[in-house]
Image (spheres, rainbow, N blue to C red):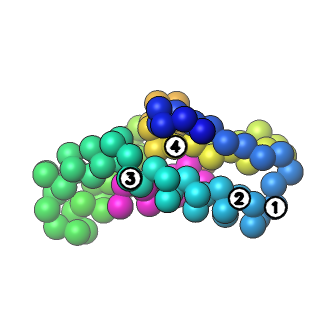
Amino acid sequence: MSNVGFDTLHKENASVEDTLQLIIDFINQYSKDGFAKSIAQRLRKDYAGKEEFLQALFDYYCRNVEYLLDPPGIEQVYTPARTIHEGKGDCKKAAIFLASVL
């Protein structure tokens, strides 16, 4: 994986445990990168309260990402930057994005 922020990782016929580990690995790696931090800083500047911030973060995600499932039999995870760049994602991509920014 590179540090560009546009990595994709997929595993064919992944088990639930495989998928959860991919999600955890991506959150741990990309919660510290500049993209996730910049989104958090931008939203915190305008939304100081915790509930306001969380609502703004969820709204940001929903405005920028259309729900789309992975192809059958393939589990893909994207970095937060890749998810926003692609403009599409499933629950895994949402979890990675939201947890990384938090």
Label 2 to label 1: alpha-carbon separation: 6 Å
Q: Residues within 10 Å of mark 3 (few under 14, many from 20)?
A: few
Magenta span contains residue 94: yes
Of the numbered discs in the image, which one, if any, rests on residue 64?
none
The three-letter amino acid code for the residue at tag 3 is Lys
Write down the region rendered in magenta.
Answer: 91-102
The residue singled out by tag 1 in the image is 15
Name the front one of labels 4 and 3: 3
Q: Is residue 32 visible?
A: yes
> x, y (%) of residue 9?
67, 42
The three-letter amino acid code for the residue at tag 4 is Thr
Say which residue appears at 16% left-offset and 67% top-offset: 49
Cβ atoms at labels 1 and 4 below 8 Å apart: no
Name the front one of labels 1 and 3: 3
Cβ atoms at labels 4 and 3 below 8 Å apart: no
Label 4 to label 2: alpha-carbon separation: 14 Å
The three-letter amino acid code for the residue at tag 1 is Ser
Dot 1 or dot 4: first in sequence order is 1
The residue singled out by tag 3 in the image is 32
Name the front one of labels 3 and 2: 3
Q: Residues within 10 Å of mark 2 (few under 14, many from 20)?
A: some
Of the numbered discs in the image, which one, if any, rests on residue 19?
2
Dot 1 or dot 3: first in sequence order is 1
Provide the secondary structure element on which disc 1 rests.
loop
Provide the secondary structure element on which disc 2 rests.
helix
The three-letter amino acid code for the residue at tag 2 is Thr
Q: Quadrant of the C terminus?
A: bottom left
Label 4 to label 3: alpha-carbon separation: 12 Å
